[in-house]
Image (cartoon, helix red, strand yellow):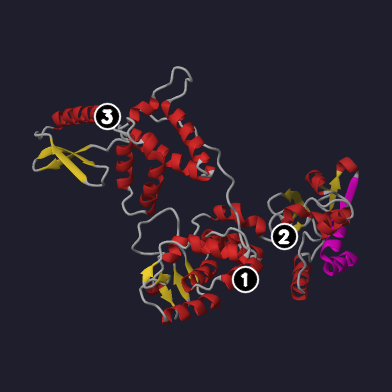
Amino acid sequence: MFPSYRLTRYRGKFAITWIGDDGQRYRRSTGTDDREAAQQILEEFIRGSRQRAVRQPYRVEELWDKYRATLGTRPAATTMGHEWKALKDRFGRLRANDLLDVDPETHLTIAEILSAEHVVERRKAGRQDGTILTELSRLRTVCNWAAERGMLKGVPKWAMPPMPRPRSRHLSREQFAKFLDRAVVPHLRLFTVLAIATGGRMGAILDLTWDRIDFERGQIVLDNPERDRTAKGRALVPMNESARAALLEARDAALSDYVIEWAGDKVASVKKGIRAIGKAAKVGAVSPHDFRHSAAVWMAEDGVSMSEIARYLGHKDSRITERVYARFSPEHLLAASKSLEVGEFTQKRLAKRSPGLSNTKVEKALVLAKILLASPPEATFVQLDEVSDRFVIQLKNGVALAIPPAIMHGVTGILSSQLYEVRVIRRGRTLQLQSLGVDVSLLDLLTKALGAPAEGMRRAS
C-alpha cells in the first residue's frame, strides 16, 4: 500500500500530510487555502509519488534493508540478518523488477528460476526444506511489501520447497530424567528445569531476569515488558516446587540480573549445550524447544484442558493447542469412538449416555415428579430435540419432560431415528408411532421413566 495522503490545515493553508515507512509524520504545504485547488494538487502529488516509486530502480538488497528497518528491534530483524547470508549472492544485486521478467525458453519468471536454483543449492549444502522455506518466504514477504508500496511493479512468483511436517518431538518423563541426570553444568541444568516447568521458549527463558521471579506469590513472569510486541505470546506461570528449588539455589550464586547466566553474562543460546547433553544421555537429538513440546504433552496426558494448556503456553488461540496436542489427551475423541460401538457393546453405550445421579438427587427428582404429575398426564405435543439429544414431552399442566432416547428405546422399543415420527393421540394420553403400529400409554411411559411417583399415580387412576 502507498502512504495514506490527506489534506490538513497548517498555518492557514492546506497541506498534504502522510505517515512514512519509518512511522514519522510528513507534511508538505500546497500554498493555497482553497480546498478545490488543494485537492487538485493532492491528486497530482499522489500520481507523481506513485510514478517516482515505480521508476525507482531498487535492487533486492535495498528492499531487504528497507523492510528490515521497519521491524525495529523485534527478533525478526535479527533473524533476517542470518537469512540474508544465504540469499545475498544470488538475489542481492539484482534489480527487483527483473524478478518479474519471463524467460522465453522456460516460460518461467526470473524469480521462479532463481528460487528453484536456491532450493537445489541449499539442499546440496545439507540444509533442510524447512530452513530453505523460511529463507524464501522472507524474501517473498519483502517483495510483497515492496509491491504494495509501489517500489516493485508487481508480486513475483516463487518456486518454494514443500512444507515440512511439523516437528513434534517430545521427551517422555523417563527420557527427561535421564537427560536431567546428565545436565551437570549449572546454567544448562537450570535452563532445563525452567523450560519444562514453564513451557517457555528458549528466548523467553534466556531473557528472564530476577525482578520477574516472584517467590512470594509463586509466579514466573516470562513476558519482558521492554521487548517489542510479537505474535508469540509469553505467559505468567505458577512456580512449581521443582522450579522454586532450582531458582533459590541459583539466586544464591547469581552474578547478574539474568536468571540464566554464564560467568556473570547473559547466555545467548543453549542449543549446542542441550544437544550435547541429549547425546550423552542417549535420548537422541534434543533441542531447547523440545522441552516446550514435552511440557504440553505431559499436561495433555494428565487430562489438563486444552484451554488451560493454551494459557500456560501463551497461545492466543486454543485452536493452535488443540491441533498439536489434543491427540495426547486420554479424553481425545473418546466420546466419538464410543458412538461407534457395535453389537453387544451398543447397549452399554446407550446405558452410559445418561450419567447416574446421587441418591439425594434421585429423591429430590421423585418428589418433584410427584408434585408435577399430581393428575393423570396429558401431552400437548412431543418432539426430539437434537441439541440436547432428548425426547421432549410438553404436558398440558405446563410441565416439560426431557427423556433420553435410550430410555424411550428401552421402554417402548422405538429407536432414536424413529422418534421424529411419534405423535400425540387420544386427548394427549397416548403416544403413537403409526408406521410401526405402536401405541404407548403416556402414563405407562412415565411410570417406567420416573419410577414410584408415576406408578402410584397409575394405581390411583
Mark 1, residue position = 177
- Whether residue 199 sits left or right of residue 325 in the image: it is left
Cα gap from disc 3 to disc 1, whole angstroms: 59 Å
Tell me if I can see residue 352 in this picture.
Answer: yes
Q: Residues within 10 Å of mark 2 (few under 14, many from 20)?
A: some
Q: Give residue 459's quadrant in the image.
A: bottom right
Report the residue at 23% width, 37% height from top. 5
Label 3 belongs to which residue? 57
The image shows residue 244 at horizontal and vertical percentages of 50, 78
Give percent across and percent down for residue 302.
65, 67
Is residue 201 in sight in this rendering? no
Q: Tell me which segment is drawn in magenta.
A: 438-461
Which residue, given by chain and number where applicable, does mark 2 sit on? 399
Count of numbered circles in the view: 3
Horizontal side, residue 415 vs residue 264: left or right: right
Say what secondary structure mark 3 lies in: loop
What's under tag 3, amino acid-wise? Answer: Pro
Tags 1 and 2 in contact by the CB under 8 Å rule? no
